[in-house]
Image (cartoon, helix red, strand yellow):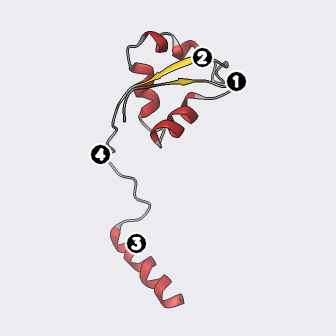
Amino acid sequence: MADSFWFTKPDEMLDYICWKFYGSSSGYVESVLEHQHPFNYRLCDQPELLPGELSVYLPDVVIHNKFPIRLWDEEKQKLLVEKHKQQT
């Protein structure tokens, strides 16, 4: 993925923009806000609902989740899968 620019529509939010562009907002919102680019200067001072026609620089970043979220431990997951198989 290459660096890109996003031109906002009225009332778009930065987390929505990151989700649409990167496929996730987790970690990307922070990367966009921390990236030193003239278009993103004072981006954090904007209201949550961004004005229209604002240029947002979207850097080429990759976020690796070091701690994947698991709703159940592996044993619980195996039990749920087995229970589901028995019901079908």
Residue receiving disc 3:
77
Which of 19/72 is in front? 19
Residue receiving disc 2:
54
Q: Secondary structure at mark 4?
A: loop
Q: Secondary structure at mark 1?
A: loop
Task: Give me the C-alpha separation between circle 4 and circle 2.
Answer: 33 Å
Residue receiving disc 4:
66
| Of callouts 3 and 2, the N-terminal one | 2
Q: Is residue 84 above or below residue 6?
A: below
| Of callouts 4 and 2, the N-terminal one | 2
Circle 4/circle 3 CB separation < 8 Å:
no
Residue receiving disc 1:
10
Which of 4/47 is in front? 4
Residue at 48% over, 38% down: 25
Give the amino acid at mark 3: Gln
Give the amino acid at mark 4: Lys
| Of callouts 1 and 4, the N-terminal one | 1
